[in-house]
């Protein structure tokens, strides 16, 4: 059976599809090579959806940092002699904070308290997510309301195309929401060998509540959160304790096993990405894609 890697990028505008695909490929290859894994990469197909949200992609030929199309976080190789800090105390604080946020905002039936606060934060700071979950579909918002369906169709089409292959689905940030939605509610019959989430907000109360609403509206009316039915080997959830998007990183405590007995395995990693200006961003996809833990999981997928 042919193996294939399907990638789903996260929120925010991106460079053009070919450039982003190449940078993901470089990052993955860098991680394999750095950790001594010799297997050649299979086909990598990028499910690119930034063009649905943005009229023009980020442009690597633009050198003006003030331009909205300037790329301030291009792919860069791992910094030499990079030594991560000791974040044990910070991790304890963030885990505690994540639990408290869940208690405050999320009820036992997955309904949301203080939803106006969550909605305000999403509208102000996470434009893509606000559009994705838009429910106000008056005529003037009609084009925005179609965005969610267009994004999901791109992934469902790609999964269908590779349904006879062995699939490793790698999703970053908001891409993990898209992947979860498609595998749970649109293409649940498609088999996925390995599901990877990186820097995922799937544990954030607002997102949990949105997903639970979809379950309640489904024919079976399920109320629990569950691993998508097509994932039959593993679900690996990679997080960096400094990544603010993964504030509640314990997806393994949130999502129940599916009928294949697969549930999320939370894996703490070090995201070493630094921009060309030397600014550390522990949420960046390139740093997740080249870490040793992901390289090991990928090597296992490639060797069967």
Image (spheres, rainbow, N blue to C red):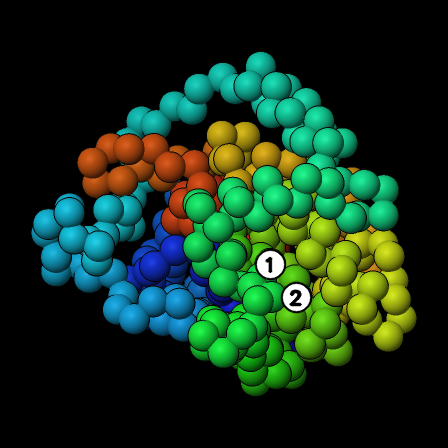
129 or 114: which is nearer to us? Answer: 114
The residue at the point 43 percent across, 36 percent down is: 282
* Residue 205 horizontal side relative to residue 149, left or right: right
Determine crowd level at label 2: few under 14, some 14-19, many 20+ residues with C-alpha closer than 10 A: some
The relative height of residue 85 versus residue 44 in the rendered view (above or below) is above
Q: Where is residue 240 in the image (x, y as percent from the top left)?
A: 52, 35
The relative height of residue 294 versus residue 10 in the rendered view (above or below) is above
155 or 44: which is nearer to us? Answer: 155
Q: Position of residue 247 (x, y in %)?
A: 59, 35
* Residue 103 appears in the rendering: yes
Circle 2/circle 1 CB separation < 8 Å: yes
Q: Which mark is residue 177?
A: 1
* Residue 45 appears in the rendering: no
Residue linked to disc 2:
181
The residue at the point 66 percent across, 45 percent down is: 115
**Local SS, label 1:** helix
**Local SS, label 2:** helix
* Residue 105 horizontal side relative to residue 177, left or right: right
The residue at the point 86 percent across, 75 percent down is: 219
* Residue 49 horizontal side relative to residue 183, left or right: left
* Residue 55 horizontal side relative to residue 91, left or right: left
């Amino acid at each position: 059976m042919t193996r294939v890697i399907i990638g789903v990028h996260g929120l925010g505008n991106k460079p053009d599809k070919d450039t982003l695909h190449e940078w993901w490929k470089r990052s993955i290859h860098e991680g394999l090579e750095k950790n001594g894994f010799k297997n050649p990469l299979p086909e990598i197909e990028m499910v690119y959806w930034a063009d649905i949200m943005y009229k023009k992609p980020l442009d690597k030929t633009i050198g003006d940092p003030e331009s909205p199309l300037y790329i301030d976080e291009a792919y860069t190789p791992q910094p030499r002699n990079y030594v991560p800090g000791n974040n044990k105390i910070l991790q304890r604080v963030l885990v505690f904070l994540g639990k408290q946020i869940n208690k405050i905002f999320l009820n036992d039936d997955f309904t949301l308290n203080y939803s106006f606060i969550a909605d305000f934060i999403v509208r102000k700071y996470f434009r893509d997510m606000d559009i994705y979950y838009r429910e106000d579909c008056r005529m003037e918002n009609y084009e925005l309301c179609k965005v969610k369906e267009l994004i999901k169709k791109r992934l469902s089409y790609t999964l269908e195309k590779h349904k006879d292959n062995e699939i490793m689905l790698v999703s970053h940030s908001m891409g993990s929401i898209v992947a979860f939605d498609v595998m749970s509610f649109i293409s649940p019959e498609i088999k996925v060998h390995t599901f990877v989430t990186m820097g995922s907000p799937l544990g954030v109360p607002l997102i949990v509540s949105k997903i639970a609403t979809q379950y309640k509206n489904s024919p079976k009316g399920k109320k629990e959160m569950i691993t998508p039915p097509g994932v039959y080997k593993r679900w690996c959830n990679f997080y960096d304790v400094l990544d603010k998007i993964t504030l509640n990183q314990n997806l393994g405590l949130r999502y129940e096993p599916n009928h294949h007995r697969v549930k999320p395995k939370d894996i703490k990693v070090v995201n070493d990405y630094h921009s060309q200006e030397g600014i550390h961003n522990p949420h960046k996809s390139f740093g997740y894609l080249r870490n040793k833990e992901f390289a090991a999981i990928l090597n296992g997928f490639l060797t069967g």
